[in-house]
Image (cartoon, coloured by chain):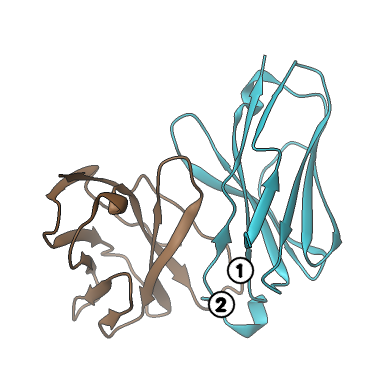
Amino acid sequence: DAKTTQPNSMESNEEEPVHLPCNHSTISGTDYIHWYRQLPSQGPEYVIHGLTSNVNNRMASLAIAEDRKSSTLILHRATLRDAAVYYCILRDDQTGANNLFFGTGTRLTVIP
Amino acid sequence: DTAVSQTPKYLVTQMGNDKSIKCEQNLGHDTMYWYKQDSKKFLKIMFSYNNKELIINETVPNRFSPKSPDKAHLNLHINSLELGDSAVYFCASSQSVGQGYNSPLHFGNGTRLTVT
């Protein structure tokens, strides 16, 4: 799987939007962009995924650059419960293997 | 109801012992996984089973043996435990690979294994 680069940490004030960036300059045409998050003392939790178009769900939005070499996870109103490590992961749709490669992620701190 | 449940939550044992971690999912998925998260918080896949058959086996010592009695269960047995086995082990499940390579994984809350 191609590599992703994320900032080690970010801070946000409660109830403000958060934009978590991810660079994936070596992304291939068949790579989907996935986001998971891991809250303290819990297992990773699926957030969102996309291929080319921007995606929205009840948890977040995913904005994908036109050249697909970067993407941004958007939390529209950060809450204290959103404090977690956020992982940006590329998954090849062609390999047939459903495993995920987790990098170091971005630790999000939400300030009350 | 918990979707993916692991037992025990904590496991403290001595070097050389044999221990098992159990995992059950009630999501109707037929692919299950074991991941290991080390002290540096890196998450790495260990095994993946689809319909009770092993489909991914990363470089893991053969002291680790997964066992899948049915699609809803994937247990992890570890022989001759070593200090370096101390970590948090996560079980996960997803829809079958054939039904969508990008089906999300659902994780349990982990088993913290401490080997003394």
Counting from the top left corner in percent of width and height, residue A107 is at 28, 44
Residue at x 43% of width, y 79% of height: A30
Disc 1: which residue: A97
Counting from the top left corner in percent of width and height, residue A77 is at 17, 64
Amino acid residing under circle 1:
Ala
Q: Residues within 10 Å of mark 2 (few under 14, many from 20)?
A: many
Amino acid residing under circle 2:
Tyr
**Residue A33, numbered label:** none
Residue B63 in view in this figure = no
Say which chain is cyan. B
Of residue A18 and residue B87, the one placed in the foreground of this image is A18
Residue at x 63% of width, y 62% of height: B1
Residue lying at the far front of the rendered structure: B1
Counting from the top left corner in percent of width and height, residue A84 is at 33, 48
Residue at x 54% of width, y 75% of height: B103
Q: Is residue B34 left or right of residue A52?
A: right
Q: Give the distance between the C-alpha atoms of the residues marked 2 and 1, in whole angstroms.
A: 7 Å
Q: Secondary structure at mark 2?
A: loop
Q: Which quadrant, please, contains the C terminus of chain B?
A: top right
Disc 2: which residue: B101
Residue B8, located in which quarter of the rendered image?
top right
Q: Is residue A3 left or right of residue A11?
A: right
Of residue A41 and residue A71, the one placed in the foreground of this image is A41
Residue B1 in view in this figure = yes
Chain name for mark 2: B
Say which chain is brown. A
Residue at x 56% of width, y 63% of height: B106
Contact between labelled residues 1 and 2, with CB atoms less than 8 Å apart: yes
Residue A96, located in which quarter of the rendered image?
bottom right
Q: Residues within 10 Å of mark 1 (few under 14, many from 20)?
A: some
Q: Secondary structure at mark 1?
A: loop
Label tally: 2
